[in-house]
Image (spheres, rainbow, N blue to C red):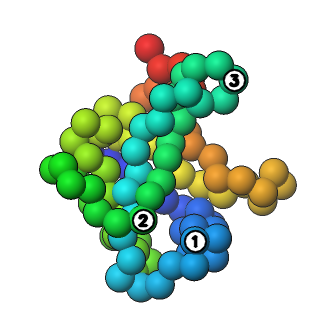
Amino acid sequence: MNFTITDEALDFYKKEMELKKGDSLTLYVRVGGVGSGGFSAGINRGIPEKAYVTLEKGGLLFCITEDDQWYFDGMTIDYHHDFGEVTFMNERIDDVINPK
């Protein structure tokens, strides 16, 4: 399982969610992304109750459950300054909203 969170995305989450060193976040797959249907990434504070993998970055712990690894494996989470939003790109999945 390999995923990347850029420094820009990390800074965005720290500021927007008022996070401090040692906090944990869980990334998960949401059904019903942009438009009517599809998938998108969700994020919650805390550690999941199911088995998970982690990535530590900037003093934060990012967790992904085994059930959601298919979506996040190979993903890069970045922050797009021009649009003022976090972006999710995965070379393994052509369309992260409607993966095949």
Residue 11 appears in the figure: no
Mark closer to the chain start, 1 or 3: 1
Check disc 3 and give the amino acid type: Gly
Q: Residue 78 carries which label?
A: none
Q: Do the residues labelled 1 and 3 touch (CB within 8 Å)?
A: no
Residue drawn at point x = 44 percent, y = 14 percent: 100
Label 1 neighbourhood size at 10 Å, few (<14), some (14-19), many (20+)? few
Q: Nearer the viewer, residue 47 or 5?
A: 47
Check disc 2 and give the amino acid type: Arg
Give the position of the N terminus as an image quadrant: top left
| Residue with the mark numbered 2 | 45
The secondary structure type at the circle numbered 3 is loop
Mark closer to the chain start, 3 or 2: 3
The residues bearing labels 1 and 3 have C-alpha atoms spaced at a distance of 25 Å
The residues bearing labels 1 and 2 have C-alpha atoms spaced at a distance of 9 Å
| Place of residue 28 in the rendered image (x, y in percent of width and height, measured from the top left) | 40, 45
Q: Do the residues labelled 1 and 2 touch (CB within 8 Å)?
A: yes
Check disc 1 and give the amino acid type: Met
Question: Along the horizontal axis of the image, is 79 left or right of 52?
Answer: right
Q: Which of 32 and 22 is in front in this view?
A: 32
Label 2 neighbourhood size at 10 Å, few (<14), some (14-19), many (20+)? some
Residue drawn at point x = 59 percent, y = 30 percent: 33
| Residue with the mark numbered 1 | 17
| Residue with the mark numbered 3 | 35
Q: Is residue 92 above or below residue 46?
A: above
